[in-house]
Amino acid sequence: MRAHPAGPRHAEVLPVGRLGAPPSDLSALDPKVWPAGAERREGVLYLAGHDVRDLAAEHGTPAIHLDEADFRARARGYAAAFAGSDVFYAGKAFLSKAVARWVAEEGLGLDVCTGGELAVALAAGFPPDRLALHGNNKSTAELRRALEAGVGRVVLDSFAEIARLAALAEELDVRASVLIRVTVGVEAHTHEFIATAHEDQKFGFSLASGAAAEAVRRVLKHRNLDLAGLHSHIGSQIFDTAGFEVSAHRLVGLLGEIRDEHGVELGELDLGGGLGIAYTPEDDPADVAVMAGELRQIVERECAMSKLAVPRLAVEPGRAIAGPAGVTLYEVGTVKDADGLRTYVSVDGGMSDNIRTALYDAAYTCVLASRESDAEPMLSRVVGRHCESGDVVVKDVWLPADVAPGDLLAVAATGAYCRSMASNYNHTPRPPVVGLTAGASRVLVRRETEDDLMRLDLG
């Protein structure tokens, strides 16, 4: 697995673009980016005490390794920072039965947005009253199952859904607790496809058009719907509270209008998720305790101005808990120099296990993980094995110039939105997720096989 070349390639002086000059130490692990359990021993990367060469031998590559202690510590950090509020882990980031149990044991709620995610949560024994069901197009079957299971909150997203849920609740003779998702017109500083509160998108009820106020009127007319509060989500990879401040101002304004029109003060305000993480050393995410304090102050100030009682806050971190806990290990297969440009380092995974680079132009960092190297820096692009020129894992990275077939590369911050967005493109089986503790590694989600793929092909 660890073949080495006869001699190092010579890195040319190339334009580095957004990457900047090479670091003085290519083996360094920035603590903002890597899980707390990541360290180097004699040049080899260890994750939660495990030699990555041993992990690759036991679990194969590519494989996503999730540091359980790191995940749990981040969950506890959110619970502590938002004490007195509700913290829902956003299962879309990554969800398995084991992860659902970790979330439950750390005292968090759980967001699900499809019947499949709901099924995983229920199979894990997650307390249904601590579940919230999202989604812009929930089916009747999904809503029925949520009501039958006793899901704690349903986040309403359309007028059709209000009528659909009300009819089901009446049929089942239950009272559904709901939040109205409000599109507040705030466009967070993020990629177009992950900014979710501007007007031209599929989620929620527009505040500016009056749709949100009309949704409130319709919900309040249904005796089987209990309007608990308002919900908003302004985007992802957000590093400051500026967008939340505008959003909170508008949401609290709507709370005041609801009080004035209906004589009702709603008791809950869910500000959504979206707090960012460091994918590269250049990223500078906010401290969760500082962010929590600022969000509280913003809402308290807005409520005081509107003479409203402060509602119970909720937030929905997903990436911020799972993302930094995950590291993907790949094996290098081909190294190809593109003269005058860069070197292409091809690995045994790609866009089927991490679509984010192709979809969002996401930036990642990676390191040579399986050995020590003192070779000079080489401007590299880590690419996958799929039949697409856009199949890029890490767009720009400095790697040692002696990287060779058989080496292991580790890509950081892959715990969120990698396995959960994985595909079988080119009939590639999806990779496993391996949970790591100091004493053991265990498969949380097994690797797919060709037999799994053929089982669905009825010929």
Image (cartoon, rainbow, N blue to C red):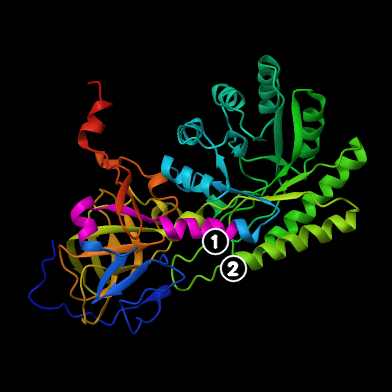
Percent of width and height locating residue 133: 59, 36
Residue 295, given in percent of the width and then of the height, sits at 71, 61
- In what quadrant of the picture does the C terminus appear? top left
Disc on res. 186:
none
The answer to whether residue 428 is visible is: yes
Q: Is residue 286 above or below residue 393?
A: below
Q: Quadrant of the N terminus?
A: bottom left
Give the residue at x 78% y 52%. 250
Q: Residue furthest bottom?
A: 24
Q: Which mark is residue 276?
A: 1
Q: Is residue 13 left or right of residue 271?
A: left
- Which amino acid, by three-letter code, is at mark 2? Ala
Foreground residue among 454 and 80? 80
In the rendered image, the residue lying farthest to the top is 171
**What mark, if any, has residue 286 been given in the picture?**
2
| Amino acid beneath label 1 | Gly
The residue segment tinted magenta is 54-78
Give the vertical position of 264 relative to 33 (above or below): above
Q: Position of residue 90 (x, y in %)?
A: 54, 47
Residue 351 in magenta stretch = no
Q: Are marks 2 and 1 in contact (CB under 8 Å)?
A: yes
The image quadrant that residue 389 belongs to is bottom left
Query: What main secondary structure does the magenta stretch of the protein show?
Result: helix
Residue at (28% x, 82% y) in the render: 13
